[in-house]
Image (spheres, rainbow, N blue to C red):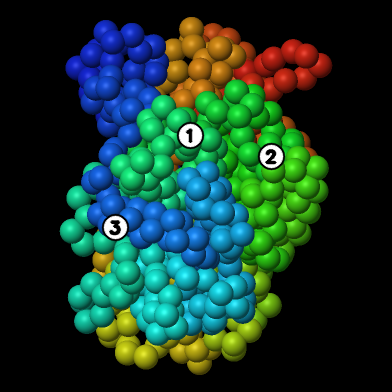
Amino acid sequence: MSLSPTLTLRDVPPRVTWALEQAGVHPLLARLFAARGVLSPDELDDGLGRLLAPADLHGADCAARLLADTIAAGKRICVVADYDCDGATACAVALRGLALLGAARDTLCYVVPDRAVHGYGLTPAIVDLALQKRPDVLLTVDNGIASLAGVAHARANGLAVLVTDHHLPALINDTVALPEADVIVNPNQPDCRFASKNLAGVGVIFYVLLALRGELRQRGAFTPENQPRLDALLDLVALGTVADVVKLDGNNRRLVAQGLKRIRAGKMQPGVAALFTAAGRDARRASGFDFGFALGPRINAAGRLSDMTLGIECLLTDDPGRAAELAKTLDAINRERREVEAGMREQAEALLEMLMPEGEPPPALAIFDPEFHEGVVGIVASRLKDRVHRPTFVFALGQDGLLKGSGRSITGFHLRDALDLVSKRHPGVLVKFGGHAMAAGCTLAEEDFDTFDQAFQQVAHEWLDAATLSRKLLCDGPLPIEYFNAETVRSLEAQVWGQAFEPPMFSDLVQVVSQRLVGEKHLKLTVKHGGTVRDAIWFGRSEPVPERVTLAYRLSVDEYNGRERVQMVIEAAG
């Protein structure tokens, strides 16, 4: 079973809407932006000059000096990446950016952990791997803030360590514990006054490069007129930001908007262009959807089932032929990932049915099967969470014999804090854990799974009330008839939507004229909306809907034989 959502209308402040309209914003967009918290036209200015200043990012100035000194001395820098899309794009941005700013290419290298062998972050084992490349400086991207042992191991071996990350620091006895790195740049570390706490890992390293360029300018390496153009990296910054599902606050929306503008104009890395081609998407009409559901999954697939080196190399190569070859490989791995995921979802849903004999799910889910693949547990946890609207952990058996779990949460339940409470109540059960409010990971022994399951459910029982456990879908209300056209679709697709700035979801009462199954699992409908007959489709839905029903839907354009047809893509019914 899936929990049907309650359709809830977003609040639309009328004065803000009016002010946006007076500033020249299209009336429909003014309504949508106001409902998402935009208060003034200035917030919609996506110019690079509106980006927050690097000087406010704690540690960025020290990082700039360390990197400038390292480059000047011709010393070697090894980037320590992460095995997801944010980590891969951050690694590519770091290496490309450092080269743009004067680092000799033979002084730059990188390592990336194997998910199954090394686990996450700057572990001592990854430091040992990096030491084989004889670096002087380790530069972490999208990891390192909780790597106390790894940083200590690197320092003990004579390396300088610069940590750039966006995750939450570790807690020891309720006290923030930071690694003893030479420099830490992380908007979520204590005492950082940077206004955006939502930078992705790729955004953090981009800001470090901006600070480095400023430092080199002060040293006379170049002038404002001839300095390297770091906006050439914004296609990668935008991709990593959307793929990591961080909140798209004003600063992140500007980063993504700038990246999309470059891509639509044909200005992108060969690897990004090749990924658009491999995914069958048109880069001239690039959108955040492409990053989150087409390019991002293909890069992530390498880290899940193979080696993230493939993804990083695709983003690093300047050879279009090599990029196309790597993108095809990533596409094939992603197809394999889908097959593995489909099998795991089927197993997980069978286990789920056993957990809810009365049809009602428990307050939280923890699911394990010896056949599960470690690289796909996060995706399956996300799918199950969406289906039953419960905090969910899915576990697989790691190569070291321990269970590796990945969790996804619902609004109102801070997953990392829940794990922290479990660890306090049951010392030793969690070998390690980390993450943030909506996603987290943990490691435990197989014999401790039942203890974890019960403890996790107990925390959920204490923290979650009926209102939080009821699934809600925020909607933008009826779509005025005059806007039901392809021009509106294109206008909406040109905007930046994403996490915490969700794409429009309209809701209208319609009369169902006809409905039938297509492909055995999708409901194809013809509905009467505002006196006009419309096409609609509900993917993954096989049950019929009532003759009169309120549908929550988004708009899309279906192109066939050169003709455009606007259709409703249904997400829910109320």
Which residue in the protein does label 3 denote?
62
- In the structure shown, which secondary structural element does the residue marked by tag 3 occupy? helix
Q: Quick check: can you spot residue 402?
A: yes
How many C-alpha atoms fall within 10 Å of the one at disc 2: few (<14), some, or many (≥20)?
some
Tell me where residue 309 appears, x and y as whole percent.
66, 61
Up the image or down, 444 lies above or below 508; here it is below
Left or right relative to 147: residue 173: left
Which residue in the protein does label 1 denote?
229
Q: Which mark is residue 458?
A: none
Amino acid at circle 1: Arg
Q: Quick check: can you spot residue 4?
A: no
Left or right relative to 369: residue 327: right
| Towards the viewer: 134 or 140 | 134
- In the structure shown, which secondary structural element does the residue marked by tag 2 occupy? helix
Up the image or down, 122 lies above or below 330; here it is below
Tell me where residue 473 appears, x and y as whole percent.
41, 40
Amino acid at circle 3: Cys
Q: Are marks 2 and 3 in contact (CB under 8 Å)?
A: no
Q: Nearer the viewer, mark 2 or mark 3?
A: 3
Q: Earlier in the sequence, mark 2 or mark 1?
A: 1
Tell me where residue 146 appears, x and y as whole percent.
36, 72
Q: CA distance from mark 2 to mark 3?
A: 33 Å
Q: Which mark is residue 270?
A: 2
